[in-house]
Amino acid sequence: MLRYLTAGESHGQALTGILDGIPAGLELSSELIDRQLQRRQMGYGRGDRMKIEHDQVEILSGIRYGITTGAPISLLIKNLDWENWIEKTSITPVSNPSEPLTMPRPGHADYAGVLKYHLTDIRTVIERASARETAMRVAIGAICRELLSQFDIRIASHVRRIGKVSATTKLTNYDVINSIADGSLVRCIDPNAEHQMIQEIDKCKLEGDTLGGEFEVISINVPIGLGSYVQADRRLDGQLAQAVMSIPAIKSVSIGDIEDGCLSGAQFHDQLNLTETGSIHRTSNHSGGIEGGISNGELIIIRAMMKPLASLRQSLRSIDLATNEPTQALKERSDVCAVPAASIVGEHVVAFVLAKELLAKIGGDSIAEMKCHFAAWGNRWDTFSSRD
């Protein structure tokens, strides 16, 4: 069973993670993970924090001579900004602790967090609830996507909308989406929309405001049969939706062309056809590659909507929890827009789910064993009549 845990605070010494269940025999390097961490740090509209951090992973266990051993893989990403926060985030008691923060920011976990954990300082909530934690999830997902690549399963993403500006360009060659998106300041494959998105971000920055938007994650060459309909928690669409929704600031997730849900069933559903060679194909993919909680062999297409970030330079109304008096919410350093970065995080949380389900389906304690099982599984599905 593939599983992971992360730990660490936004301005603490480091983020840590443990990924358990990766088979032995997978070639892996810190440089491979670092490339994905660098992609997460890109994007027009990021704040000053990204000028400080230059995320690099340290692999502490689970790999020998560049090859996974089958043991848990432990990872560490140092927070370079910790040097500026040693007193405020000290693990041990200090003689002059910082003044408690008591003015919760609307839209953050501040208010609910201090009540849930019976805290008196919002700083404690901010440190763990921060999206900084997603750097470790990208590192973990980078290992999972390398596992998926052994079976030619690939993942791409791009930004569909920022603020009121939507992309209209559509590509049919999904293998080039990442290369095009990564070349855009906002990870948008539509050059005209990219220019307008940048203008929107600049306008919001001057106003001390923030912007949200929508991104799309596409999984390519996912085989038929991942997930299951037999129990709710095994449905692939449910697992993917939960993974993407768990990214901070994501407020909605859809799979497939949900905007076409107003169509009739005859118009919406992806009908099956036979080719001249006898193989089955579909002329549409409105369901986004999943039917009945199971991957159906088509592209898995996930769309996520990110709300405007809740840390604004302009103050919002709040209540001082120490005095119970109206006040302005505290101001915390923040991005203006993080939709491009969120799309990269989206790729990697999806990679974890797909890798977990692939391992659950075919099994194997080593990559060699997995490939044998995968080949046998593929051969078994060549023709319907051969199944028993």
Image (cartoon, grey):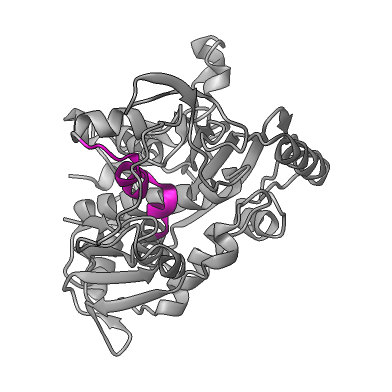
The one nearer the camera, 69 or 184, is 184
Residue 75 position (above or below residue 254): below
Q: Whole-percent x and y of residue 379?
A: 31, 58
Q: Position of residue 157 (x, y in %)?
A: 56, 49
Magenta-colored segment: predominant secondary structure: helix
Viewer can see residue 221: no
Residue at horizontal 35%, vertical 52%? 98
Q: Is residue 171 visible?
A: yes
Where is the C terminus found, in terms of image quarters? top left
Vertical placement of 383 versus 324: above or below? below
- Residue 329 falls inside the magenta stretch: no
In front: 21, or 161?
A: 161
- Residue 293 quadrant: top left
Q: Position of residue 140 (x, y in %)?
A: 34, 62
Seen at 27% across and 57% down, the residue is 6
Nearest to the observer: residue 116 or residue 365: 116
Q: Residue at x 16, y 30 (%)?
A: 231
Indicate left or right for 15 with 166 as reference: left
User: In the displayed structure, does residue 8 sit left or right of residue 347?
Assistant: left
Query: Farthest residue toward the front?
Result: 95
Range drawn in magenta: 119-135
Point 39% across, 35% down: residue: 245
| 347 in relation to 265, above or below | below
Q: How many marks?
A: 0
Q: Identify the image quadrant of the N terminus.
A: bottom left
| Residue 291 image position (x, y, % from top left) | 37, 30
The quarter of the displayed image where residue 212 is located: top right
Left or right side of 183 for 82: left
Q: Is residue 124 magenta?
A: yes
